[in-house]
Image: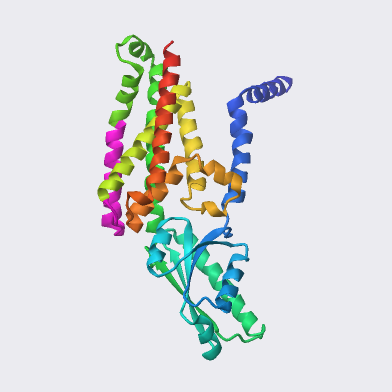
């Protein structure tokens, strides 16, 4: 028994001395509870709404103030005509547009009812559903106030809900772009992260060290095959999305493929960077899967709106490349926008790519010395 207890004590000491094991045992559960506790939420916070007020009377102002003072919404743009609605929703910041009909207050007083249109961005089905439900509830509460909080409330203000880009709120419009984003960064980063570490473990690094190839040539040689195969993956996913789900590309296919090539290159660069830092293939795989999968799913805006998260998670999300590619692919694929609507996200991805390649070359040179 004494020997057994000594063996158990030795195992405890072995675990406590291994930093990676301690991170897995205590670090990952702590991070997961913090992420899921704050990110996985059905509450709506700080969603921007735009107003198209064709009446501009006292009642429309009261409804607008009630919506913006609810704590769920923030006042965005003030639109001048119907042509501005599509432009506002394509900008990605506005989640819904509220339209007051002409002579809204006069109709409410004389006829006892008036119409208010709620136009939401259907390219994000979850967010669109939350937004319209909250806005409808606020309008219903306003009706109660007008009716004097009576038990039977007449429908004084009638909300009419419409969805742009995805009228039926099909789930494919959310998960197909998200899956493309996740698959590309996970496969590309995972495949390339084990390339240089595999050379180290198999003892073939010496061959590369004595070869006349420069570090940039070795890195490019590792990246190009995966780049071409990953591009074939993108084409295959787009074809399946069209043939199986009927989700066609509304914008420029050439622009979408060009943006996909940039995203693939960025993902491969991150994988190479991981491979130059990791000492073993196991470590490289762990960093690629744990370091990329969970944050990409929760903090990229793929499933849960970034606007609903605490600010600190928004800052973390800002350094995740999937966040920007999801915006790009939704704009081009679903909204049919052009480069002018995604140039900022494209520039950010280019910066990520250049930084990852630069750090990879720097780390690779250190390894060669």
Which residue shows up at 57% across the image and 70% down it?
64
Which residue shows up at 55% across the image and 84% down it?
156
Regarding residue 193, the answer to whether it shows in the image is: no
Residue 195: percent from left, percent from top? 37, 25
Q: Is residue 168 above or below residue 320?
A: below
Which of the pair 338/159 is nearer the observer? 338
Regarding residue 107, the answer to whether it shows in the image is: yes
Which residue shows up at 45% across the image and 20% down it?
363
Q: Residue furthest right?
A: 2
Q: Residue furthest bottom?
A: 110
Q: Let me know if residue 235 is in the magenta part.
A: yes
Looking at the rendered image, the quarter that the C terminus falls into is: top left
Image position of 333 (left or right of 95): left
Residue 252: percent from left, percent from top? 27, 51
Image position of 71 (left or right of 212): right
Which residue shows up at 26% across the image and 50% down it?
253
Residue 21: percent from left, percent from top? 59, 28
Looking at the rendered image, the quarter that the N terminus falls into is: top right
Q: According to the image, what is the colour scheme of the structure?
A: rainbow
Q: Is residue 364 above or below residue 151?
A: above
Which stretch is magenta? Answer: 226-252
Image position of 227 (left or right of 95): left
Which of the pair 256/39 is nearer the observer? 256
Q: Let me know if residue 125 is in the magenta part.
A: no
Q: Main secondary structure of the magenta part?
A: helix
How many callouts does the rendering have?
0
Image position of 282 (left or right of 71): left
Residue 302: percent from left, percent from top? 46, 50
């Amino acid at each position: 028994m004494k020997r057994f207890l000594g063996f158990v004590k030795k195992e405890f000491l072995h675990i406590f001395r291994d930093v990676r094991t301690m991170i897995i045992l205590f670090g990952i559960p702590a991070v997961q509870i913090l992420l899921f506790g704050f990110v996985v939420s059905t509450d709506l916070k700080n969603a921007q709404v735009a107003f198209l007020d064709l009446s501009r009377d006292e009642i429309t102002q009261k409804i607008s103030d009630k919506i913006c003072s609810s704590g769920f919404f923030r006042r965005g743009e003030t639109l001048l005509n119907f042509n501005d609605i599509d432009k506002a929703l394509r900008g990605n910041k506005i989640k819904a547009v509220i339209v007051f009909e002409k002579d809204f207050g006069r109709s409410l007083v004389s006829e006892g009812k008036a119409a208010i249109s709620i136009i939401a961005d259907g390219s994000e089905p979850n967010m669109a559903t939350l937004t319209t439900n909250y806005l409808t509830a606020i309008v219903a509460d306003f009706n109660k106030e007008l009716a004097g909080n009576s038990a039977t409330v007449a429908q004084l203000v009638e909300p009419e809900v419409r969805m742009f880009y995805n009228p039926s709120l099909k789930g494919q419009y959310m998960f197909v772009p998200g899956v493309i984003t996740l698959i590309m960064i996970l496969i590309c980063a995972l495949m390339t992260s084990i390339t240089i570490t595999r050379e180290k473990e198999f003892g073939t690094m010496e061959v590369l060290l004595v070869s006349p190839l420069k570090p940039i040539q070795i890195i490019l040689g590792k990246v190009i095959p995966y780049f071409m195969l990953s591009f074939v993956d993108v084409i295959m996913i787009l074809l399946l999305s069209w043939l199986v789900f009927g989700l066609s590309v509304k914008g420029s296919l050439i622009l979408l493929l060009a943006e996909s090539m940039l995203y693939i290159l960025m993902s491969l660069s991150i994988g190479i960077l991981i491979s130059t830092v990791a000492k073993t293939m196991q470590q490289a795989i762990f960093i690629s899967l744990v370091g990329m999968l969970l944050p990409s799913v929760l903090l990229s805006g793929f499933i849960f709106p970034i606007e609903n998260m605490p600010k600190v998670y928004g800052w973390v999300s800002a350094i995740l490349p999937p966040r920007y590619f999801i915006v790009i692919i939704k704009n081009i694929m679903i909204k049919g926008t052009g480069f002018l609507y995604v140039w900022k996200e494209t520039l950010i991805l280019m910066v990520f790519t250049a930084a990852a390649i630069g750090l990879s070359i720097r780390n690779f040179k250190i390894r060669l010395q």
